Image: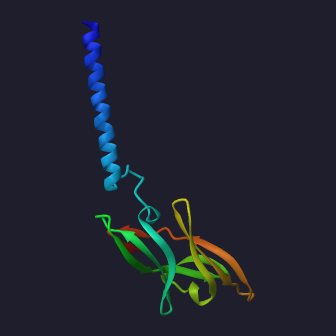
Amino acid sequence: MGCALGGAWLRELYSMKKFCLAFILMASASGVHAAGNSPTIMDTCSNIAVSFAGTQVGITAICQRSDGTPNETSVILSDISNLDGVLTRSRGPSTFQRSCGSIRVSMQGDALILHARCKSLAGYYQPTSIEIDRLSNQNGELIN
């Protein structure tokens, strides 16, 4: 009798393992993530690059919509300025592009980093960078 109980218990455990594995695979395929581990734009976007629209600077990327199809999208960056050769947070439209060159982005882990060479008050250019942490992909559209 002990063997029968043990066998039933093992079959139930095996069945639960199969269910859990199926759930995990379905959640991964549908983009469901554990709390606190939501996807970043690096998870759902590709070809992330700096772009310009007139005098404004932005980020362009190809991002997945919720149905998995790609969408080319861009967003204008705001709230970044050059303060004596250092990229800093500010309020309003970004102005750093007026006194910075070699503007580019890179991915470092889950962070998107904006790099530039910015002019200081003394007149020389120095390398600087700042994390762009306010961007998200909402159904294939970059949102700032």
* Rendered location of residue 12, percent (x, y): 26, 25
Q: Residue at x 63, y 85 (%)?
A: 101
Q: Quadrant of the C terminus?
A: bottom left
Q: Residue at x 55, y 59 (%)?
A: 109
* Rendered location of residue 30, percent (x, y): 31, 55
**Residue nearer the viewer, 71 or 124:** 71
* Rendered location of residue 67, percent (x, y): 28, 64
Q: Quadrant of the N terminus?
A: top left
| Image-based side of 104 in relation to 121, left or right | left
Q: Is residue 124 above or below residue 108?
A: below
| Image-based side of 119 in relation to 47, left or right | right
Q: Is residue 2 above or below residue 70?
A: above
Q: Is residue 39 above or below residue 63?
A: above
Q: Residue at x 43, y 68 (%)?
A: 45
* Rendered location of residue 92, percent (x, y): 47, 83
| Image-based side of 117 in relation to 12, left or right | right
Give the total of numbered labels.
0
Q: Residue furthest top?
A: 1
**Residue nearer the viewer, 116 or 18:** 18
Q: Residue furthest bottom?
A: 54
Quarter of the image where one finds residue 7:
top left
Q: Residue at x 63, y 88 (%)?
A: 99
